Image (cartoon, rainbow, N blue to C red):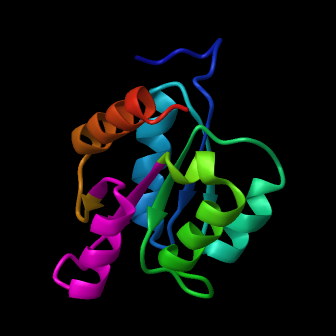
């Protein structure tokens, strides 16, 4: 699966948990992606100025600017990228979060997730999420 000579594009991982961002970085790099990590939505907004992304892995609960606010920003400013968001959260029982994700129509990776789950949802999103 690893291809050092070509990249499948850049992925922005918006995640404040170091272990989760490490897992995402390793799995996505093995899959041929360049990976950039932002600890919250504000930092992610800055990263967007630096280039185009194929996909965004977005934790719902991050400090400073949470995933819901960052997603709303994407819908308004980068709608094509908003259609390639995968949400992550460890709080699957919060009704407000569940309703928000359902209304967005975007996939959810519930924490804790493993490398195979991550690969599968990325493959489905990249395959079916292009404009």
Q: Is residue 94 above or below residue 43?
A: below
Q: Which residue is depicted at the point 34% across and 75% down?
A: 100
List x then y, in percent, for residue 40: 60, 74
Quarter of the image that includes the C terminus: top right
User: In the image, is residue 76 part of the stretch drawn in magenta?
Assistant: no
Q: Is residue 112 above or below residue 17?
A: above
List x then y, in percent, for residue 42: 70, 76
Query: Which region shows up in magenta?
Result: 85-108
Quadrant of residue 19 within the rendered picture: bottom left
Work out whether residue 110 can be spotted.
Answer: yes
Work out whether residue 36 can be spotted.
Answer: no
Quadrant of residue 13 within the rendered picture: bottom right
User: In the image, is residue 93 part of the stretch drawn in magenta?
Assistant: yes
Query: Which is more toward the observer, 30 or 74?
Result: 74
Q: Which residue is depicted at the point 53% across and 15% down?
A: 3
Quadrant of residue 94 within the rendered picture: bottom left
């Amino acid at each position: 699966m690893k291809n050092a000579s070509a990249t499948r594009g850049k992925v922005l991982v918006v995640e404040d948990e170091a272990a989760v961002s490490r897992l995402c970085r390793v799995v996505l790099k093995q899959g041929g992606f360049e990976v950039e990590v932002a600890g919250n939505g504000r930092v992610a907004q800055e990263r967007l100025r630096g280039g185009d992304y194929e996909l965004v892995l977005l934790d719902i609960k991050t400090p400073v600017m949470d995933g819901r606010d960052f997603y709303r920003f994407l819908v308004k400013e980068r709608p094509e990228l908003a259609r390639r968001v995968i949400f992550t959260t460890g709080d699957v029982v919060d009704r407000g979060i569940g309703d928000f994700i359902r209304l967005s129509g975007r996939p959810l990776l519930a924490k804790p997730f493993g490398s195979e789950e991550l690969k599968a949802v990325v493959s489905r999103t990249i395959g079916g999420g292009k404009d």
